[in-house]
Image (cartoon, helix red, strand yellow):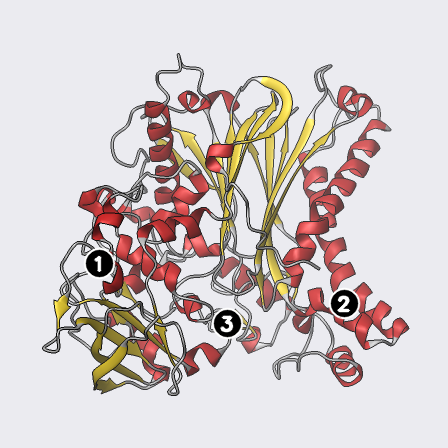
Amino acid sequence: MRRAAVIAFRTARLVPSRSFALRAKSGFQSSSYVLGLRHASGQSKTSSKAAASSTVAATTKGASSMYIRRFSVAVISGLVGYGAWYTYKGQTELANAGNPFSAGQQRGFANSPVLSPEGEVERKAVIVGPDSLYTGAISGEGPISKQVDDAGRQVLEMLTPDQATQVLRRNEESYFVGRGKGVVRYDVVQIPSNNPIEDDHSEKIIEIPQALATATGARSSGSDWMFWGVFDGHSGWTTSAKLRQVLISFVARELNNTYKASLSDPSLSTPTTEEIEAAIKTGFTRLDDEIVHDSVEKVLKANSKVAAAELLAPALSGSCALLSFYDSNTKLLRVACTGDSRAVLGRRGESGKWVATPLSVDQTGSNPDEEARMRKQHPGEENVIRNGRVLGGLEPSRAFGDASYKWTREVSERLKQSFFGRTPSQLLRTPPYVTAEPVVTTTKIEPSKGDFVVMATDGLWEMLTNEEVVGLVGQWLEKQSSEQSGNSGSSWATLFSSQQKGLPVEHQQQGEKKKGKDGQKTPIRQQQWGVKGGENERFVVVDKNVATHLVRNALGGKDQDMVCALLTLPAPYSRRYRDDLTVEVIFFGDGEKSGDVVLNKEASASATADVKAKL
C-alpha cells in the first residue's frame, strides 16, 4: 500500500486554542454540516492530550464543495467526505454492494476524481492543529495512510457508508419478551467514542415467587419485576462496569425487603409509592457507600497496592446511572436517575401523534434546582457550583464513585501517599459534594396503548431533542408496520401503527422551550455541527434495530458524509465531536405469552463484539 503524498499545504490562519469554545457559537457556514468543538455543556471528558495532535482528513476534489468563510473557529468545514480511493477505484462496487441508502442519498460519492498535472489523483485536505488551521491537497491513487507523521498529524481514511453501517450495528441487540406481562420488546445499542467505552448497560427480569406475588395482589400466574439500566461512566470505565454487575441486585434486594415487610402488616396489601421509591434510593446509596467508603477500609486493612488497584478503581472513576423498574402487576414504571442520563416516555396523544414526556431530570450544576440544593447543603461556599460544574470540575451533580468529591482531604492524601490517587480540589471544604441518591419518578404505563420508553446516556440528548427522539421511534414504527402489513396484523409493530406522515410527534409550543427552565440539556451538537433542514431532509429509516435507528439519525441521518466522518474519527479525537452512546428502547404492549425472552436476530449483530471492559 503506497502512502499518498501530502503537498501544497498553506497556513490559513493561526487560531489560539483557548478561544475555540468561546467562539464556537459564531462559527462559519459551509455547504455541508459543520464540525466544531464541544461547548455550552462544558469540557470534554477526555484529557487535553487530544488537542496536542493534529487530525488530517481527505475528500475528492469536487466531491462535495468545501470552503471556509471564517477561520475564527478551529473546526472542519464540510465534514470531509469519502476518500478518492473509493470513488476512483470502486464506483461500480459502491452501487452494487448492498448499500442500504438510495442513490439519491449518496451525495458527493459519484463524482470523478480530479487529476493533477502529473496525472495523479488529487484530493483536498483539511488539517486542524492545536493552534492552527491548514488547507491543502493530497495526491496519489492509494488509500490514505492512518499513520502519524513526524509533525504529529494523523491522516484519516474515511469509512464508506457500508462500513459506517457495520460500525453502527456492531453492538446492537434486540429481544422479544414473551412473558405476557406488558413488555413485548426491547432494543439496545452502544457506539464507543472513548477507548475503551466508558458506558455500560444491564437488563434483568426477576420472576416474583408465587407466595409474594399473590399476597401483593398479583394474578395467580405471578408477576415480573423488569429492570433496564444504562450507565454513563467518566474518568474511566470501572465504575460503570461495577454498576452493570451489581446495581440491579442491590435495588432488587431492597425492594424484596420492602415487599416482605408489607406482608407482615395486615393493614397493607402492597408497599406505598414512597416506600418503594425509598427502597430504590437505599439500593443506590448502599452500593455507592460500598464503592467509595468500604473500599478504603479494605485497602487500609490489606495494605497492598494490588488490592488498592482493584478496590479503588471504581471509586476514583465515576458513573451516572439511569435505572427503570417495571412491576407487571401494578403496571407502574419507576425511573431512578443519578446524573444526566435521561428517560423519555412516548405515548399516543388524542391527535394520534406521539407525546414526549421526560421521566427524569438532568442533574448537573447547570440545573437551577440542583444548584440551589447544593448551595443549601454547603452554605458560604461560593464555588460549590462554578461554571455549571461541581467545584468547577465535575458536570453531573449526582454520580456513583467520584470519590475525590466525597472523601475528606485527609483520606485522599493518605491514599495517594500510601498507594495512589488524585489530588483533591483546592476548593474542597465540606465533602461530600456529590451524592449517588437518585431522583425517582413513578409513571402508570398503559400497555394497551403501545407506550414506549427511551433510555439513553447524555450523548444522545446532546444531538436530539426529546420530541425528535420520540418522533423518530414513531417514524420507525410506521415503517415496520407498513413492511409487515401482510402478516394479517400479527406483527407486534401493528400495535403501534397510526400511518402518520413525517415525524408523528406533538412538538412543544415555543413558549415551553425556555432554556434552563426544566434543567434539561439542549442538543448543543446541532449548533456545533451547524445542522439545518427539516425532518424530511435530516432523517432516514434503514435499520431494523430502533436504538441503532436513533443513533444513526443523531449522527447525521440522511447526510452520509456526516455519519461516515463522525464514525471515522478515532479516540481521543472523536470526543471533541461526540460522546459514548448507549441507547435502550422498551416497547410495552399486550403481546403473546410464551414465557421466553428470545433474541431478535434480524435486529441483532450476528456476532456481537464485547465492548465492555471487564473488572
Label 2, on which residue? Answer: 310
Tally of numbered discs: 3
Where is mark 1, residue-wise? Answer: 87
Tell me where residue 218 sits by quadrant: top right
Residue 305 point in image, percent of width and height: 80, 76
Q: Residue at x 73, y 78 (%)?
A: 412
- Pointer 2 or 1: first along the chain: 1
Helix, strand or loop at label 1? It is: helix
Residue 161 as seen in the image, left or right of residue 548: left
Task: Give the residue pinned by disc 3.
Answer: 46
Q: Position of residue 352 (x, y in %)?
A: 33, 25
Q: Identify the residue at image location x=36%, y=34%.
A: 476
Compare residues 503 and 13 and report the one nearer the observer: 13
Q: Quadrant of residue 117?
A: bottom left
Kind of element beneath mark 2: helix
Looking at the picture, does residue 449 appear above or below residue 519?
Answer: above
Q: Quadrant of residue 394?
A: bottom right
**In this view, which residue lies farthest toward the left?**
117
Could you tell me if residue 264 is visible in this image?
A: yes
